[in-house]
Amino acid sequence: MVKKYIAFALIIFVLTIFISKEIRITTIDDYAYVVAIGIDAGEENILKVSFQIASTSENSSDSGGADSAATSTVSTVEASSIDNALTLVNTYTSKELSLAHCKIIVISEEIANGGISDYLYTLINKMEISPKCNIIISKVDCDNFLKQASSNLEKNSTRYYEIIETTANYTGYTETITLSDFFSKMEDTFAQPYSILGSVNTDDKTNEDASTLSNSETEKNVKAGESNIKSKNKVEIAGIAVFNADTMVGELNAIETICHLILSNKLENCKITIPSPFDNSEKIDLSLTQKKNTKFDIKILNGSPYIKANVKVNARILTMNKDSDYLNSDNLKEIEEYTNSYLESQILNYFYKTSKEFNSDILGLGKYVVSDFTTWNDWVEFDWLNNYENSFFDVNVDTNVKSGYLLLET
């Protein structure tokens, strides 16, 4: 009996040694963490894929000390697929690439114009990549975009991309959309997908169109890569890339993006500039917030969608001078009426641009009328996404304008 126990113990001992040799314990230092992926069209192969890799010190530093000044590196390779590119980069890096902390997927405009569904299926199929990754369509090569994606205000690249996601909350110039959101809309019958629009600012560029526009016109028409800002931070995020299914069909500028946020009930805060109703040579800056959710009344008339939108916003006057009389109720009423007219015009422009020019319902208005169809087959046969271009619109804006908070309190 004792011999059996001894033999059993020896077997367990040998197996333990054998298994321990086969098991490799990995730690955080064994991986190189990809914080962003860029997908360009290749010159000698199908794709040019870029991986922005955070430095080890950047991943381990939370205190903002000396280590936080470390920068990330960008590795670019041409390959026949994203997976092949990943394998090729792994062959010459000292650590295995991990996609678990990827924050941003950047796709070039050239690729987007040809359709991106194959690449999204590949990415959504990777368990490592979070479905909460944001998608940016870049108007420049993605490797250039990623190399410039650093900020004077934030040295940690992962944190920098998190900051980009929040800019929509206080500018209204873009809206973030995740990989899962984009994929869902791409497969939907109610809506079309869209994404962040990004570019790189070049100090030596000249904007011929801007030279003929007033400052306020230039600001509202700005898109990524077209501003006159001069900064060490070269990356610009402004506007929305509009898709029809998986293909990019156009872009929205700053004011059009603000209209999109208002209509989709996602506006947190933004600033707009309107001509003064009292003097056309002067401008009034307004801070806008959403008063109530936008209400839609949509009917199908003679086979075409009739879309009515009722918008309610709050506006606070930012522009002041010694001659301003914005506490006068008659003056405030005139500003309100002018703001209503201005926003109605901009929202109608947004509707007609997305419907007639792009034929892309990025608002997902189809969800408001699907219940009017008796069966699912009736809805599919109506083909909302293609019928959106036949829509006509009616917009009503109700703005509640207030003067400066300090003046109201004195």
Image (spheres, rainbow, N blue to C red):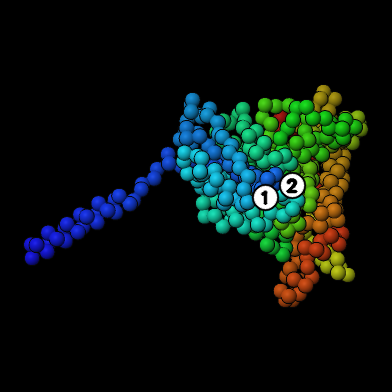
**Residue 277, label in figure:** none
Q: In which quarter of the view is residue 339 placed? A: top right
Quadrant placement of the N terminus: bottom left
What is the x, y in percent for residue 76? Answer: 61, 40
Q: In which quarter of the view is residue 73 placed? A: top right
- Give the mark, 2 or 1, whose residue is nearer the N terminus: 1
Q: Secondary structure at mark 2?
A: helix
What is the x, y in percent for residue 29? Answer: 42, 39
Taking depth in this image into account, of 325 and 102 the one nearest to the observer is 102
- Residue matched to label 1: 46
User: Can residue 317 be seen here?
Assistant: no
Give the answer, above or below, for where 78 lies relative to 151.
below
The disc labelled 2 sits on which kind of residue?
Glu
Horizontal side of residue 231 vs 74, given as left or right: right
What's the residue at 70%, 40% (across, down)?
Answer: 141
Give the answer, above or below, for where 194 lies relative to 389.
above
What is the x, y in percent for residue 256? Answer: 79, 45
The disc labelled 1 sits on which kind of residue?
Ile
What's the residue at 67%, 57% (across, down)?
Answer: 117
Q: In which quarter of the view is residue 196 placed? A: top right
Horizontal side of residue 298 vs 4, given as left or right: right
What's the residue at 75%, 60% (across, down)?
Answer: 365
What's the residue at 84%, 51% (across, down)?
Answer: 353
Residue located farthest toward the front when viewing the structure as drawn = 44
Quadrant placement of the C terminus: top right
- Residue matched to label 2: 110
